[in-house]
């Protein structure tokens, strides 16, 4: 007969075994998009049918508008308790996001681990940086999840992620009052201070502006190049800033202005408002000047490494950012902004040495001369204005090199068959219209001007949202689409929060 001690051990072992069996493994979780055409996996029923339906509709609408794919997964437990490993494995297994764009995101709730995570693909790390993901999970999702309101918490996170994606990552999301009654009540407690001097309210708004600028600068430091290129950079300012973790960025671009404002609030010197405004303005102006110097250093480094196309793409992606800096800091950022075109022309046609004989003096051929060195496909791309090819000829050894610059505003895309940038969209046909109960399907027709091959590609049309939220279906399985994800990948970006 078993003793009480042995009986207790057997019970503990049984409980452990049952919890291990209940844990979800990556290879066991069915892909809802492949089975039901849904963006939400809810195998353990943690979310209600109405919440699943609403979240799925929002995510389908986002994909129809932008092509960005977001998956939501809510499970009781993950295998081995490794939330990050589960998110990374599931992301790669499903391939969330479009291949080549890597613009996918995964919002994961692991209830037994009391953790919620936003996991991003490579292409969304600039729009959804780790700090923004951390703020969404900790400030917008945790209050409701901690209270057991899983529908509310997951929906709040999805809406915040969608808002950030649609804004293009233009700044830190503001907290919206009314999302969580208990959190907003805690934040709106009165300080009972009706002082004549309203300096603190002014400083609070100045500090909010500091957070906006800090997030913008942090994002641009991270988005100037791919992660795998960062390790190749030297010890310059830009390379060092890109290698810093997010908390050191926050310490520099948020902590220092905060300490400055706290010091002013304690000392209360004359002209408090103008001191605060001037100090914050000067701090970020200095950061912008250092960033401009770092950009020029990076351009020179890329030119030396013969990364001409990446250099041109970097300058193109920096235009919006530096346009904003020129508006905020007219002197001297306006001068820097208007020299970007000159920098692009300078580096594109700057003299360079031959890659074969190492002799200087390579010559960029004219449009008429370069045709003799370009193939038929390359000449076709030039005539379609989809790719601009530069041919450089070495007069010493007679060797030449060709550099292809894709045109960003071209209506042609790359053909999956012949790889030429000559595929044209011929038409778009709605096969099955979307309704309030199911998504629709459409077909796009393409033809390549190079190989003349035609292709038909199907896509999903988001379900039409009802004006009222009275319907509460038990599941989101009414979708008739059975498409798969796009084949995106992730480098482990994002953030988790636990309660």
Image (cartoon, rainbow, N blue to C red):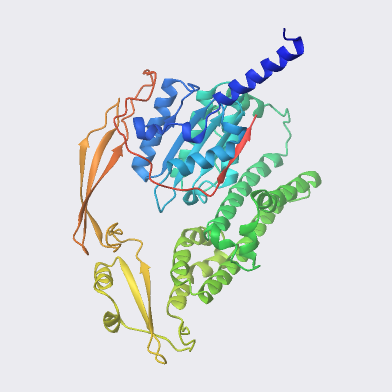
Residue 23, placed above or below residue 378: above
Looking at the image, which residue is at 48% across and 85% down? 353
- Residue that sits furthest to the bottom in the current view: 396
Looking at this rendering, what residue extends furthest in the top direction?
A: 1
Task: Answer with left or right where residue 97 lies relative to residue 418.
Answer: right
Image point (34%, 74%), residue name: 389
Would you say 430 lies left or right of 373 here? left
Residue located at (64% from left, 65% from top): 237
Q: Is residue 1 visible?
A: yes
The location of residue 225, given as percent across then percent down, is: 52, 61
Residue nearest the viewer, comparing 173 with 208: 173
Image height of 424 relative to 463, above or below: below
The quadrant in which the C terminus is found is top right
Q: Quadrant of residue 392?
A: bottom left
Left or right: where does residue 230 sit relative to residue 384? right
Q: Is residue 466 left or right of residue 189?
A: left
Q: Nearer the viewer, residue 18 or 298?
A: 18
- Toward the viewer: 397 or 304? 397
Is residue 147 something that shows in the picture? no
x, y percentage for residue 411? Answer: 28, 58
In the image, farthest residue toward the front? 1
How far across and how far down the image is residue 212, in percent?
Answer: 58, 48
Residue 157 location, x and y as percent? Answer: 52, 33
């Amino acid at each position: 007969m078993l003793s009480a001690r042995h009986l207790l051990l057997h019970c503990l072992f049984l409980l452990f075994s049952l919890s291990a069996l209940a844990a979800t493994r990556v290879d066991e979780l069915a892909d809802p998009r492949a089975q039901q055409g849904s963006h939400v996996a809810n195998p353990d029923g943690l979310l209600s049918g109405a919440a699943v339906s609403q979240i799925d509709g929002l995510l389908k609408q986002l994909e129809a508008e932008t092509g960005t794919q977001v998956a939501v997964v809510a499970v009781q437990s993950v295998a081995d308790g490794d939330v990050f490993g589960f998110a990374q494995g599931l992301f790669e297994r499903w391939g969330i996001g479009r291949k080549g764009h890597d613009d996918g995101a995964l919002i994961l709730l692991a209830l037994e681990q009391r953790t919620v995570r936003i996991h991003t693909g490579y292409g969304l790390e600039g729009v959804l940086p780790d700090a923004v993901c951390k703020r969404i999970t900790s400030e917008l999702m945790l209050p409701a999840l901690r209270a057991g309101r899983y529908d509310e918490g997951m929906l709040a996170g999805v809406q915040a992620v969608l808002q950030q994606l649609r804004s293009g990552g233009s700044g830190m999301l503001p907290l919206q009052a009314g999302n969580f009654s208990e959190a907003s009540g805690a934040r709106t407690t009165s300080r009972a201070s009706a002082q004549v001097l309203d300096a603190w309210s002014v400083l609070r708004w100045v500090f909010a502006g500091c957070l906006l600028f800090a997030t913008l600068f942090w994002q641009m430091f991270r988005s100037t190049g791919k992660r795998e290129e960062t390790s190749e950079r030297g010890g310059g300012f830009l390379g060092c800033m890109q290698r810093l973790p997010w908390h050191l960025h926050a310490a520099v671009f948020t902590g220092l202005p905060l300490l400055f404002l706290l010091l002013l609030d304690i000392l209360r010197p004359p002209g408090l408002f103008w001191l605060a405004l001037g100090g914050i303005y000067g701090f970020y102006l200095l950061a912008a000047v250092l960033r401009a110097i770092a950009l020029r250093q990076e351009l020179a480094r890329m030119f030396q490494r013969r990364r001409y196309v990446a250099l041109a793409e970097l300058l193109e992606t920096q235009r919006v950012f530096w346009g904003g800096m020129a508006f905020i800091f007219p002197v001297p950022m306006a001068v820097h902004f208007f020299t970007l075109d000159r920098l692009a022309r300078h580096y594109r046609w700057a003299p360079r040495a031959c890659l074969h004989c190492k002799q200087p003096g390579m010559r960029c051929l004219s449009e008429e001369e370069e045709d003799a060195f370009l193939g038929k496909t390359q000449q076709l791309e030039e005539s379609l204005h989809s790719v601009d090819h530069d041919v450089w000829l070495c007069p010493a050894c007679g060797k030449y090199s060709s550099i292809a610059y894709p045109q960003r505003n071209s209506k042609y895309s790359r053909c999956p068959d012949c790889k030429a940038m000559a595929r044209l969209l011929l038409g778009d046909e709605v096969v099955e219209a979307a309704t309030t109960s199911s998504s629709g399907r459409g077909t796009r027709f393409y033809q390549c001007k190079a190989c003349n091959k035609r292709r038909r590609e199907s896509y999903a049309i988001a379900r039409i949202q009802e004006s009222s939220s009275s319907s509460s279906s038990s599941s989101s399985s009414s979708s008739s689409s059975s498409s798969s994800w796009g084949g995106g990948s992730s480098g482990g970006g994002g953030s988790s929060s636990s309660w």
